[in-house]
Image: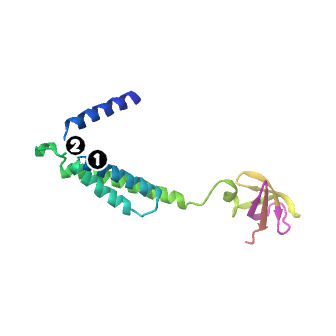
Amino acid sequence: PGTIGFIAVLLAVFALHLLPTSYAGVALILGAFVLFALEAKFQTHGVLTIGATGLLILGALMLVDGPIPEMRVRLVTAIAVSVPFALITVFLMSMALRARRNKVATGAQGLVGQIAVVRAPLTPQGTVFVLGETWNAVGTAPAEIGARVRVRAVNGLQLEVEKVTD
């Protein structure tokens, strides 16, 4: 794969050397990729994606500035490449934003708020079973075996729990 990629890059450099390439077009395309990357980093709700799509279309139109019209990139081709790229970016950014909004599900933060079942009576110390694990726990009130409790905090390897009122 690396060898094929290297050969493809060499052919692209050779082809771009033969074509009358515009540096302004290359700069606009690079600017579009910078805006796409900034959209991934910052939450702009698609504003940078719209700007990047415009830059990509303009850059593609200006990329080859040949004396013969057939050598230039057609508007239809520029749009056919730029719009799907923008749609893929919007789709991936929406998935990333949804992932950022999700509640933390691992570590100590993932345990807080979970319902546990008492395994050894909490008087006030005992053990509870939560998310497939048995934990030492300290209860705010006594609880018998089988009672349901809610995790309030995680202190090292010990949970602070409170009785659940149904």
**Disc 1 and disc 2: Cα gap in Å?**
8 Å
* Residue under pointer 1: 26
Closest to the observer, 18 or 149: 18
Question: x, y percentage for residue 124?
Answer: 87, 64
Residue 96 seen in render: yes
- Kindly identify the amino acid type of the residue bearing the numbered disc 1: Val
Question: x, y percentage for residue 15?
Answer: 23, 35
Magenta stretch encompasses residue 76 = no
The single residue placed furthest to the top in the displayed view is: 3
Q: Secondary structure at mark 2?
A: loop
Q: Secondary structure at mark 1?
A: helix
- Residue at 28%, 31% in the rendered image: 11
- Residue at 19%, 47% in the rendered image: 73
Scheme by which the image is coloured: rainbow
Verify CB contact (< 8 Å) between mark 1 and mark 2. Answer: yes
Magenta highlight range:
138-157
Question: x, y percentage for residue 67?
Answer: 11, 44
The answer to which of marks 1 and 2 sits earlier in the sequence is 2
* Residue under pointer 2: 21
- Kindly identify the amino acid type of the residue bearing the numbered disc 2: Thr
Magenta stretch encompasses residue 147 = yes
Closest to the observer, 115 or 25: 25
Q: Is residue 113 left or right of residue 141?
A: left
Circle 2 crowding by C-alpha within 10 Å: few under 14, some 14–19, many from 20: some
